[in-house]
Amino acid sequence: MKILTHWALRIGSEKALEKIIDKYAAYVCVIIRNTARDLSNEDIEEIASDVFFSLWENAKKIENLKPWLAAVARNKAKNKLRGLRTDLPLDDEIATYGNETEEAFILECEKETVKSAVLSMKISDREIFLRYYYEMKSIAEISDETGLTESAIKHRLARGRQKLRTILESEVLV
């Protein structure tokens, strides 16, 4: 049944797509939710729809359906998170906080302190730190991209966190 459905999808069967959506929708939504916990239900549904639309468009190329769905769901969730991140200029932050301009100023100072701490890391450590925390890549993905072992990456991340902690404590921000 599974192979027939996948084969039928490859030749453009909408019923096959419906069966696959019925079978894997919950699976895809769990992956999206686990990847991006801060997303609303509407965002999760939108991403899931995008995953199944990509499935429809790429059906002829897909060999292993379940891992493909998982990878696409995770990547689309990460892309959505990246799209939601915005750094407001200070004027916009002041307008957003209203009477809490002091809090906005402190937040901006903290951001700058963290940024300068990250920039003070060795280039190789900074690259790993940014890939993990900013690009939200897994340790396995970073390992594949850099050729370093997963334990080396974990060690560098721990070293980077310790450096940040030391800098932030000296600035009395923690």
Image (spheres, rainbow, N blue to C red):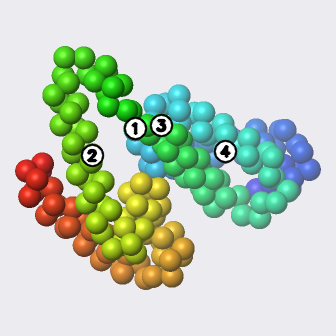
Q: Earlier in the sequence, mark 1 or mark 4?
A: 4
User: Mark 2 or mark 3: which comes first in sequence?
Assistant: 3
Cβ atoms at labels 4 and 3 below 8 Å apart: no
Q: Which residue is mark 2?
A: 111
Residue at (36, 81) in percent of width and height: 152
The secondary structure type at the circle numbered 3 is helix
Q: Kindly identify which residue carries mark 4.
A: 51
Q: Pointer 2 and pointer 1: residues touching (CB < 8 Å)? A: yes
Q: Position of residue 69 (x, y in %)?
A: 65, 53
Residue appearing at x 27%, y 46% in the figure: 111
Question: Is 100 placed above or below 125 here?
Answer: above
Tell which tag, 1 or 3, sits nearer the viewer.
1
Q: CA distance from mark 2 to mark 1?
A: 10 Å
Q: Earlier in the sequence, mark 4 or mark 3?
A: 4
- Of the residues shown, which amino acid type is indicated by label 4? Val
* Sequence-earlier tag: 4 or 2: 4
Residue picked out by circle 3: 84
Q: At numbered mark 2, what does the secondary structure look like: helix, strand or loop?
A: helix
Q: Measure the C-alpha gap from mark 1 to mark 3.
A: 10 Å
- Give the class, few, some or many, for how many residues have Cα within 10 Å of label 2's Cα (few <14, many ≥20): few
